[in-house]
Image (cartoon, grey):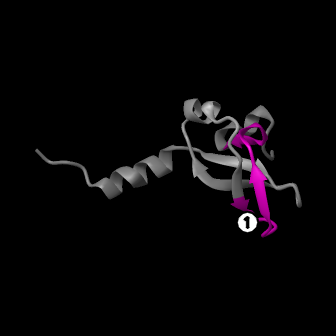
Amino acid sequence: MHWPNPRSIIKYLEQTMPNIMIRCPTVGTAVPTGLSTEKIRFESLSGVTMPLQCPACRKLHHWERKAAWIADEIEAGHGEA
């Protein structure tokens, strides 16, 4: 029996799982947090504050789930059009 290469599994998951996004409070653009998730796991994040070195303004921000969205939810009004 042939087992899949673990690296190919990780690459597949990285490509199929959407990014968690926040809006930079300094410049107002949507930025990726560097994390990706399945929607059901994202919905369960609560009370956790995460640091982010912002790629837009280079400042350190702290974000919570209530200020974030999943990248494919742009049409829901969270992200930039």
The residue tagged with tag 1: helix, strand or loop?
Answer: loop
- Magenta stretch: includes residue 63: yes
Picture residue at 64% right of the left edge, 31% below the top: 43
Q: Position of 7 compared to 50: left or right?
A: left
Decide which of 68, 74 is in the foreground and name it.
Answer: 68
The image quadrant of residue 37 is top right
What residue do we see at 64% from left, 36% from top? Answer: 45
The amino acid type, in three-letter code, at marker 1 is: Pro
Please tell me whether residue 45 is drawn above or below residue 54 in the rendered image.
above
Check disc 1 and report the residue beneath it.
55
Span colored in magenta = 52-70
Residue at the image point whose x is 89% and y is 60% from the top: 26
Q: Is residue 58 above or below residue 66?
A: below
Decide which of 53, 1 is in the foreground and name it. 53
- Residue 62: x and y in percent read 76, 54
Percent of width and height locating residue 7: 34, 58
Quarter of the figure with the N terminus:
top left
Q: In the image, residue 57 lies at what x, y percent? A: 82, 67
